[in-house]
Amino acid sequence: MGHSSVDDSTEVPSTGVLSTGVPSTLRTVRPDGTPVYRYRQRPGVPPVWVTRFDTAAAHAHLPPDHRHAHDFFVLVYVEEGAGSFTVDGAERPLRAGDVHAVPPGQVIGVASVTGLAHSRAWSVAFTPDAVPALASVSPLAWAHHPLLALFAPGAGPCRAAEPGRASWSGWMAELAEELADPDRLGAHEAVAALLTRILVAAARLAPPAPGTPDPLVDRVFAEIEERFREPVSAADVARALGYTPGHLTTVLRRRTGRPLLEWITERRMTEVRRMLRETDLPLDAVAARTGLRDATYLVRRFRARYGTTPQRWRRTMASPAESVQVDLRRRTPDMYVGRRSAG
């Protein structure tokens, strides 16, 4: 059975070939019946989850053609491959050395569990807050960020060269080891560094960015970026661009994996998290600067999105660096005592 780096029975694991055991909750169900899972932040633990699966038994509970989507990123490194899965209806074979990237919103399916009987792979699920270089990046720019190059539309799976495959397995194992004890000195920093290293390696495998952007998506994202700090709705954005909300939502979901309202919400929540992390502004001020009505509404939306309050999230995000400093201060006197004794 697949095993994870962290065992938390209080969480609700999402299911699927790429994310077994990820702490998540059901966010919504799309009109076609596809469940969408959200990452559930665990206090004091980086928003990263590592799973290693090596037999079909890990997925034996799944119904045929199980379909699901995530609101987080999933990166998979295949050590040994047999079988396949689908992403947005396109089949992807599992082959040794393959690196698969599935961005938020894309629909994952597995038609035949038995076809995975001889697959051995690592899966990393994460949110951008896990990587300092991505934490404050607008979700509207994810598709163009160098670290997320393999997640860009059309990038597809890539294959690691055989001499480097041992490094991939080593990075995954080390990341799992750090996550197994997130309270030890430097664990958060080590997790961020390892995940960044993995994303760099994945980006180096990615093909050059496509030269033809999607003009409609660019227009939508530009409108969101200009107006998300106001109390603007999906209908307002659609009308400004000359479309009905239903049509624009359908088109955007088909082209980006997420509907219009989700992109507006994601942009606002990214800015909320940035302000909580980088400022000490009160919640009323944060709400006023992110298009939300007031602090009460902000707390309700934040709790529904992340499973915790903004205040607790702010303390959690501040604690890793503070805990390292405190621990170092505690260790320093003993280190000097040891040196004096040695002398």
Image: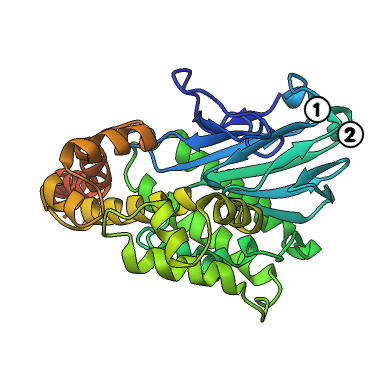
The spot of residue 293 in percent (x, y) is 21, 45
In the image, is 293 to the left or to the right of 307? left
Local SS, label 2: helix
Q: Which of 256 and 42 is in front in this view?
A: 256
How far across and down, in percent of the image, does residue 16 sit? 68, 32
Q: Quick check: 248 above or below 327?
A: below
Relative to 41, is 301 on the left or the right? left
| Residue positioned 42% across, 66% down in the render | 240
Q: Position of residue 231 (x, y in %)?
A: 27, 53
For disc 1, the marked residue is 56
Image label count: 2
Q: Name the residue under label 2.
A: 115
Residue at image coords 43%, 71%? 222
Question: Would you say the residues marked 2 and 1 are in contact, meaning their CB atoms lie under 8 Å apart?
Answer: yes
Mark 1: amino acid: Ala
Looking at the image, residue 96 lies above or below residue 111 = below
Q: Quadrant of residue 161?
A: bottom right
Relative to 284, 232 lies left or right: right
Of labels 2 and 1, earlier in sequence is 1
Label 1: which secondary element: helix
Neighbours of disc 2 within 10 Å: few (<14), some (14-19), many (20+): some
Real-space CA distance between mark 2 and mark 1, rounded to the nearest whole angstrom? 8 Å
Q: Which mark is residue 206?
A: none
The correct choice, above or below, for 8 with respect to 262 in the image is above
Q: Mark 2 is on which residue type?
A: Gly
The location of residue 244, given as percent across then percent down, is 52, 55
Q: Can residue 139 be seen in this view?
A: no
For the point 71% across and 65% down, the residue is 154
Instruction: Please indicate whether residue 90 sits to the left or right of residue 167 in the image.
Output: right
Could you say which quadrant of the image residue 223 lies in?
bottom left
Mark 1 crowdedness (10 Å alpha carbons): few <14, some 14-19, many ≥20: many
Report if residue 125 is visible in the image.
Answer: yes
